[in-house]
Image: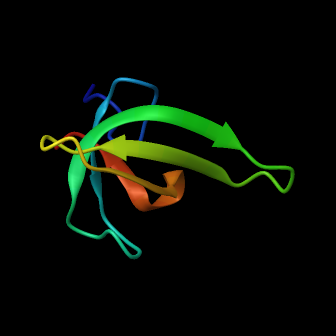
Amino acid sequence: MPAKTNAPIKDGDACMVIAGTHKGKSGVVRDMNTSKTGAVTITVVQADGERFKTLAKNVKRGA
């Protein structure tokens, strides 16, 4: 049976942004936060050291 492709992301995973403002960027997940409303945000660190925050629903595992 093939592995799940939409498994939840976790700190340290390589990821690719597939929607939103940062679409097309990739990096490593460094911080996860769940808001009061339940939205999960993550901080992504790119290879050049630049950081950005995005919603976890806009990200898929693997780079």
Q: Residue furthest front?
A: 49
Does residue 30 lie above or below 42 as drawn?
above
Quarter location, residue 4:
top left
Question: Residue 14, how many percent across, how many down?
Answer: 25, 34
Does residue 62 lie above or below 54 as drawn?
above
**Residue displayed at 36% across by 44% down:** 44
Q: Residue furthest bottom?
A: 21
Left-right relation of 43 to 15: right
Say whether residue 8 is visible: no
In the rendered image, the quadrant that contains the N terminus is top left
**Residue displayed at 44% across by 61% down:** 58
Does residue 23 lie above or below 50 as drawn?
below
Question: Residue 18, how many percent across, how many down?
Answer: 31, 65
In the rendered image, the quadrant that contains the C terminus is top left
Q: Residue furthest right?
A: 36
Say whether residue 56 is visible: yes
**Residue displayed at 77% across by 49% down:** 35
Most foreground residue, 57 or 29: 29
Left-right relation of 38 to 4: right
Colour scheme: rainbow
Question: Residue 47, how many percent across, how many down?
Answer: 13, 40
Question: Residue 24, how many percent across, how many down?
Answer: 20, 66
Most foreground residue, 26 or 8: 26
Quarter location, residue 29:
top left
**Residue displayed at 84% across by 57% down:** 37
Count of numbered labels shown in the rendering = 0
